[in-house]
Amino acid sequence: MAKSDIDIAREADVKPITEVGAKLDIPADALRQYGPDKAKVSFDYLDSLEDRKDGNLILVTALSPTPAGEGKTTTTVGLGDGLNAIGKKAVMALREPSLGPCFGVKGGAAGGGYAQVVPMEDINLHFTGDFHAIGAAHNLLSALIDNHIYWGNELGFDERRVAWRRVVDMNDRALRDIVCSLGGVSNGFPRQTGFDITVASEVMAIFCLSKDLKDLEERLGNIVVGYTRSREAIYARDLKAQGPMTVLLKDALMPNLVQTLENNPAFIHGGPFANIAHGCNTVSATRAALKLGDYVVTEAGFGADLGAEKFFDIKCRKAGLDPKAVVIVATVRALKMHGGVAKDDLAAENVEAVKKGLENLGRHIRNVGQFGVPAVVGINRFTLDTDAELAAVKEYTEQFGVEAIECNHWAEGSKGTIDLANKVVEIVEGGGAQFRTLYEDDMPLFDKINTIARNIYGADEAIADKKVRDQLHQWEKDGYGNLPVCMAKTQYSFSTDPNLRGAPTGHVVPVREVRLSAGAGFIVAICGEIMTMPGLPRVPAANSIHLDDEGLVQGLF
Amino acid sequence: MAKSDIDIAREADVKPITEVGAKLDIPADALRQYGPDKAKVSFDYLDSLEDRKDGNLILVTALSPTPAGEGKTTTTVGLGDGLNAIGKKAVMALREPSLGPCFGVKGGAAGGGYAQVVPMEDINLHFTGDFHAIGAAHNLLSALIDNHIYWGNELGFDERRVAWRRVVDMNDRALRDIVCSLGGVSNGFPRQTGFDITVASEVMAIFCLSKDLKDLEERLGNIVVGYTRSREAIYARDLKAQGPMTVLLKDALMPNLVQTLENNPAFIHGGPFANIAHGCNTVSATRAALKLGDYVVTEAGFGADLGAEKFFDIKCRKAGLDPKAVVIVATVRALKMHGGVAKDDLAAENVEAVKKGLENLGRHIRNVGQFGVPAVVGINRFTLDTDAELAAVKEYTEQFGVEAIECNHWAEGSKGTIDLANKVVEIVEGGGAQFRTLYEDDMPLFDKINTIARNIYGADEAIADKKVRDQLHQWEKDGYGNLPVCMAKTQYSFSTDPNLRGAPTGHVVPVREVRLSAGAGFIVAICGEIMTMPGLPRVPAANSIHLDDEGLVQGLF
């Protein structure tokens, strides 16, 4: 039997984090340690690197996800280790996992096999407390709003239009929709509201997009928390909330340094929802990594239609990043599912299904090309994949001038990604990247949505009723017209129908609702149902999570 | 102008926590660092000390609190520094402050003047994340309950009798009373519930009373989370919740080591509510301190009627602790208020009011005597106290054979507590302590309440209606009769009327409600209104909390 991820992680020769930092020439006193194997890197030190040249930024993205899995995080880690193995100073920049889902379906997430970051238990549990800090900052603002209304409502909140909910880092469907402030005079004015999971908080999105503490504070102040009866926006700064929220987040904003199983440095920092937010790790971690490494390997949530598009159009645009290469991860199994094979039938060789499924990958390759960044496909190999299936992938991608390279990091660590690493270096050194966003800042908001729908999703057009369009026009009048758009749609399809695999055409993208994230700095366009508070399954993973007699965590993975 | 607490703290010569640990011969690899100046001490190391003789345990308690303040934490720190100054190996064991109140009225809490623990900002904000871990464990159980009901309610919860609420570490009155699970079929069954502040969670009380992780897990499993329609109790273990909850708490349970301004070691760990729970730091920190120090100075919440009684009857009873001396803190200002002076008139000398107020102190002295532990009064001196006022206190306490000793730790640090420290050593070395609890385990529950009401509060009796008495009898039948009682009553008076200062007599103690904390291992007797979720004031402290241009926290103190 193959070793489990946790077994492999526990056998790792984990180095003191000061040694890992030393690989990047970080002095020990710039590391604020959280135990022996985790540390935050101080802003004072990072600020001192300001004049250094940036390293080369590589994005790892994927085809549209299927239940077969694609292994994006694993490939990011594997590529980082591979680049180090061929002598490059490479650093990874990843997202922090959310606590809630650990107790639900999937267990933890910190890579897998021989491509993991450690300490995986800590990373999946409280880590350095960032998400708890984000939750506390969010809920302080919530408390300040209801407290303000309670003491006289000087700002004139329309209690039906409070736009700020509460958060908890737990899958708890019972909190999706609540009535608060019951119980009489001393508890305030009853109103309907609810909780989201912490990763869905706008504070999380702000946290991930902020350059520094000043920027963070300003963005927090810009959050729209509600409206008056005459529809005037009320901001967090009107409640003087940005100061104490920033105080709660001051340590959290320092990027977290950990290591891979091969003792290479990885930043794991921030983890916004990939639908109602942009789904990338923090700008502060990416910038730190770029100053410290020659190559920085990062990832973005979901498939390239959502993750890469937002990475380019929101994160890179706003943070002034200049990506040099893209790795699109694909698996033969996922391609088969896009080609129409059911999950239970994936074991059998099926070259035709692979070929049919490749149209999904093809569209992602074309899409990435629109951003001016050269791509390579990384085939994350599974044991049962056949040579014929792999050959079909390699042959297919040639038409785009893109190579498809087999990776075996899960089984072999960096040895399994040497080819991919060499290819990435070749692309970067070739200097072919000329990054551009998909649309300009000054394009009207609905045109931005339409551009994404047509150029990325392959749709005929985006549609929206008058209410939605009027809202967008109002925001343009209010000075928000220059913001990028954050699309919230299913990750399973280019369309808004999660069952439409492959590369559907002829569809339209209905925009059901639009939301302003004025602090984060984007407009969210919601297409279809978006769940911001997951529930637990009938038999939650929590049922089997416990400490064994040796004090080791069991059941988390 | 006098320096502020935060100015003094920022001027401190803070040592690396490894150096502070070295004073207690803790090896560096037994310290799990959280930044340079905070660490958790590993269980492996603490377990290795099992055979060592315990040090001497000193409790610092106080007269009934008034708005004038008494300075119990400050005196605990001052005494600890004083004991170190006279050559004793002394360690402090204190409670962690709650995050919520920092943003409300009072700001932070980590001592004051020259008797502080540092880093005070960290201690008051997220510290090592213990409270966040406790909140997450609590809310996981909450989510598991509603999830269980959602998926068929196999255990047969009566949805009206779910006995487990949710928590957040924030002052948020809007969450006191809510209806959850609104919004239709996919969100569950609507029911009325609410949130408490994290420190009021039974998980916090359990955390503070648990000897080790095994004990913690068992206690968590024993939590009564609700009842069936036929009033059968349902336990957390029925939901298999104790395993994942323990996993969430496994790091948190290690005691936190910090230092005083004079670089002496202090454990700060756990902080349960002092009314519906027992109001002392963790057993794990106290036990660690007793193995590491010759003298351990600890404190308990509120005045001696609540704090000391619970420390003795709950914590010492359950953890097998053997206290050697008690310091009862008093201030001339508080005595004047007990003597009838209004807060605005405290500046003027008033020996008569002091004499009148001393009856409050006298009853606390007598009460402590009932537990067989010798006492000394520590007068926490304020600048405006006159010699005549101090003389009145000293003269008064002589009748009890108890010395009253002036302390000036706020202004002078350890220099101001040398006399008190010497007296404490004299008491301990005199060997006069013969600790006993106030009542035996096998006394009927209502008699326990009555015993506390008469012997500690000076009441004629405790009263309760039939429903309450029937409930107590039922619990006795269910096997909970041997538990101690945790009284929840106002801290401002020996009676249940907060306005009755001094030492009232002839009153009765009405028990409004009783609650079973089966995991923590006590019965809560609620006498009067007990608030488990505070609100924010009209102008919350949050309004002035922010980072200044140098990145320093302003407004927290």
Image: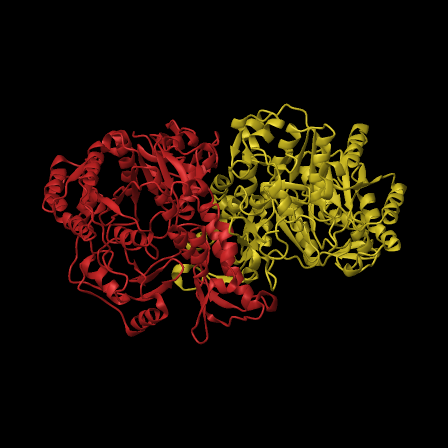
Chain colours: A yellow, B red
Look at the picture and state if B133 lies above or below B468.
above
How many discs mark residues in the rendered view?
A: 0
Image coords of residue A182 (percent x, y)? 44, 63
* Horizontal relation, residue A190 to residue B499: left or right: right
Q: Is B178 or B87 nearer to us in this picture?
A: B87
Q: Determine which quarter of the picture holds residue A111.
A: top right
Q: Is residue A521 visible?
A: no
Q: Residue at x 80, y 34 (%)?
A: A423
Image coords of residue A463 (percent x, y)? 76, 56
Q: Is A345 or B194 nearer to us in this picture?
A: A345
Image coords of residue A217 (percent x, y)? 53, 39
Look at the picture and state if B166 lies above or below A550.
below
Q: Is residue B304 visible?
A: yes
Q: Residue furthest front?
A: B51
Q: Is B152 or B379 nearer to us in this picture?
A: B152
Image coords of residue B68 (percent x, y)? 25, 44
* Horizontal relation, residue B549 to residue A375: left or right: left
* Horizontal relation, residue A499 to residue B534: left or right: right
Q: Quadrant of the C terminus of chain B?
A: top left
Q: Quadrant of the N terminus of chain B?
A: top left
Q: Determine which quarter of the picture holds residue B460.
A: bottom left
Q: Residue furthest bottom?
A: B230
Q: Determine which quarter of the picture holds residue A18.
A: top right
Q: Is A337 or A499 nearer to us in this picture?
A: A337
